[in-house]
Amino acid sequence: MRRALPDVLWTLALAIVAALAPTLLKAGFDQASVSYLSLASNAMSLGILALSWDLLARTGQLSLAHAAFYGAGAYAAAVLANATGVPIVLALPLGGLVAGLLALGLGSVTLRLKGIYFAIATLAFTEVLKAVVQELPTGLAGGAAGLNVPPLFRPHFVPGQMQRWEIAFQRNEAYFYVYAALLVLTIAVSIVVQRTRLRAAFTAVRTNEAVAAVMGVRPARAKLLAFVLSSALVGMLGALEAMRLGSVIPDGTFAISTTVFALVTPIFGGLYTTLGPILGAGVLSAVEETLKRTFAEGYLIGYGVVLVASILFMPRGLVGLATRLRRRRGGSGTPAAGDAEGPA
Amino acid sequence: MKRIRSVFVLVFVAAAVLLSTATAQVTIGILSPLTGGAAGTGQAQKEGFELALKEINAAGGVLGKPLKLIYADTQANPKVAVAAFEKLMTEDNVQFIGGGYSSGVTLALVESFKTFQPLVSWIGGAVSGVGIDNFQGIEELLGNEPWFFHVHPWDYQNTEASTQFIADSGVKTVALLHEDSAFGGPGSQAAQKLLEDAGLNVVLNEAFKSTLFGGTGDFRAAISKAAATKADMLYWIGYDSDVVPMISQIRELNYTPQQIFGAPPGWPSDFAKAPEAQCVTGLIGFMPNLPTPEAMAFTKSFEAMFDKAPDNYMSALAYAQLWSYADSINKAGTTDQAAVIKAMESLTFKSPMGPWKFHDSQITHHQGFGADMWLVFQYQNGVRQIVWPTAKATAPLQSCQASR
């Protein structure tokens, strides 16, 4: 339990910063806080995407179906909003539930596959699910055109008493808090995995399944648990973003780029850790926005250079680099969680 | 002495107010996909804007000052686009929004547009929602907003133009192949209905997966089905990246209907030189060889500035959009939104496609170009000739079977 204290402390610190951020941003930047809140929400979205993907990666499985579960959550929210009179706020847990159940079904039949075979199966699943959603009756899922999704928050403008940007601030502030809550939930799940026997089980499965089985770990069950947790979290994210962006469209909602971002960010930040994907999401988002504002169109070159350099010089990501620097300075020498195994 | 001081202060304040009004530079925020999967479109728009900006400022600018543009890259990504729009509104403090592309991006921006209510003149986002059950498209969501102007034709206007060309071409039977996304799916349904209403027989309506969305580019199965129908025309709806594999495979399978007609948003610029391009027809918004004084002037200026022809019609639309803003603000004599809207509603603007003005479409009163913007070209001996509408044609339509 004592080992969990630093994790709990930094999560608590993150939650306090998140709770104060909108007020501090508004006080410091006035109306510009509106766009900063959007950028912060986008960064948290990337953090949730990356950390939830990393949960399964800890068992050694490379999933290319993150976009499928994101899309499943988004479509669950859209269908709920359009086909029933249920309050839209329930879309969030429903998105997680639908994605989790789909993962349970898919995982039961595919998690015995290893390495590239599992990756291919999950990639195919994304395409199949997209095609199925597109072929569902248009009255239910909207077909190729998609569906509108009502917003979770729609503050009312009171002429004479407020300025228009304040409405945008209220909306972005509300979404910001929901993103922050979902991020804290994802971090909490990750910490529980890292600080219980699950970590040893996941690491053993990743390192050698046969040996793990001899040690009493049930590899199939461990992988299935990780898959369901990972998918349920990203399903909730999909539901949240469907409400924030106002629509779901098969090509955009099941876009493969969702999986690519989910995969690249933990590699950049540090695989198999709680901090790595969060740090990766924060740094990548900040670097991208800074480069965009400095170099306009040429920013992607800089962004690409940062990613290539990180793969070349930080094979274990930002967390690995921090650990290496600490060791070199003769610090505690305690490796960061998961660092010892590396990304292999 | 006291009175003189008061008069002096009054004159100073009045001068300061007048000076501040007079020196205010008009800035337009441009939301465009400058990077990412739709960067080709975004860059084409940017070229159109830059040419118009150069001409507008050379002609005296807007309200006596050089017009300024601030570009914000949407990456054709809804989340990025919302943050980019909010930056334009809250950090750059723009009053006017231009650019625009992608229906998904536009749908994500609806709430933000309605919150800030700047004057929005929007090029892309053609999904109107008209005729689609249980789905509200862009015209349905924004069409009645007094501050929203839409430049590009709506989806039903695109289909109307294609249908009219097909009916005019003299074919009787049509095999329809379409990519399966939000572009080709509803588009093919609307096209089939319009074609059948026009008395044509649609003998096949078959989906394929576009290379833009991860398709392999192997369309042989769909083409073979079309060939088996022996239809007079093969009509395909897909993306720019599908052009080369689609046409190459039609040739490879030795399928030669009377007409091969495609409606992607753009065409590869060097495709005319490929032998398989011969007799292929396509829908396009603007052609550099359009024989009108406006088109010739635009093409000449564009080539002088960028050392290439304006092949992508998004350049022409962006050019038209910026000139409409400049003319309207100058006519209004102020940046006051109501006055500029009034000017935009009343003026006729110049464009490479000819004079145009905002008019009524099915819902909005602020629709720029309609079905009559579209042209059909045909690759004839390495040159793209305009073959439809007849009034703008540079050559008559040829049958593919005649050129075998």
Image (spheres, coloured by chain):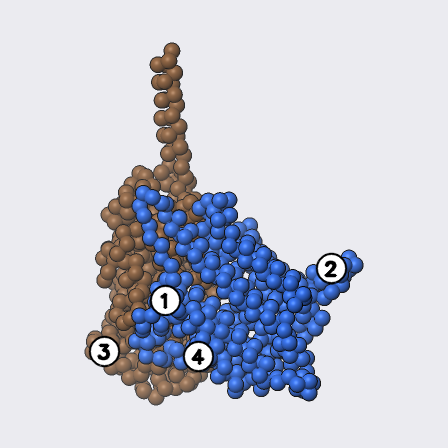
Chain colours: A blue, B brown
Between B274 and A138, the one lying in front of the other is A138
- Tell me the distance, in whole angstroms, between the alpha carbons under discs 1 and 4: 23 Å
Between A87 and A210, the one lying in front of the other is A87
Q: Amino acid at mark 2?
A: Leu
Q: Chain of mark 1?
A: A
Residue drawn at 47 percent across, 47 percent down: A26
Question: Quick one: label 4, few (<14), some, or many (20+) residues within 10 Å?
Answer: some
- Tell me the distance, in whole angstroms, between the alpha carbons under discs 1 and 3: 41 Å
**In the rendered image of this protein, does residue B178 appear above or below residue A149?**
below
- Tell me the distance, in whole angstroms, between the alpha carbons under discs 2 and 1: 48 Å
Question: What residue is shown with label 4?
Answer: A129
Question: What residue is shown with label 3?
Answer: B196
Labels 1 and 4 touching (C-beta < 8 A) = no
Q: Quadrant of the N terminus of chain A?
A: bottom right
Q: Chain of mark 2?
A: A
**In the rendered image of this protein, does residue B111 appear above or below residue A257?**
above
Q: Earlier in the sequence, mark 4 or mark 2?
A: 4
- Tell me the distance, in whole angstroms, between the alpha carbons under discs 4 and 3: 33 Å
Q: Do marks 4 and 2 both belong to one polypeptide chain?
A: yes
Residue lying farthest to the top in this orientation: B1
Residue drawn at 79 percent across, 59 percent down: A330
Question: Quick one: label 3, few (<14), some, or many (20+) residues within 10 Å?
Answer: some
Question: What residue is shown with label 2?
Answer: A325
Q: Residue B396 location, x and y as percent?
A: 29, 69
Between A64 and B285, the one lying in front of the other is A64
Labels 4 and 2 touching (C-beta < 8 A) = no
Q: Chain of mark 3?
A: B
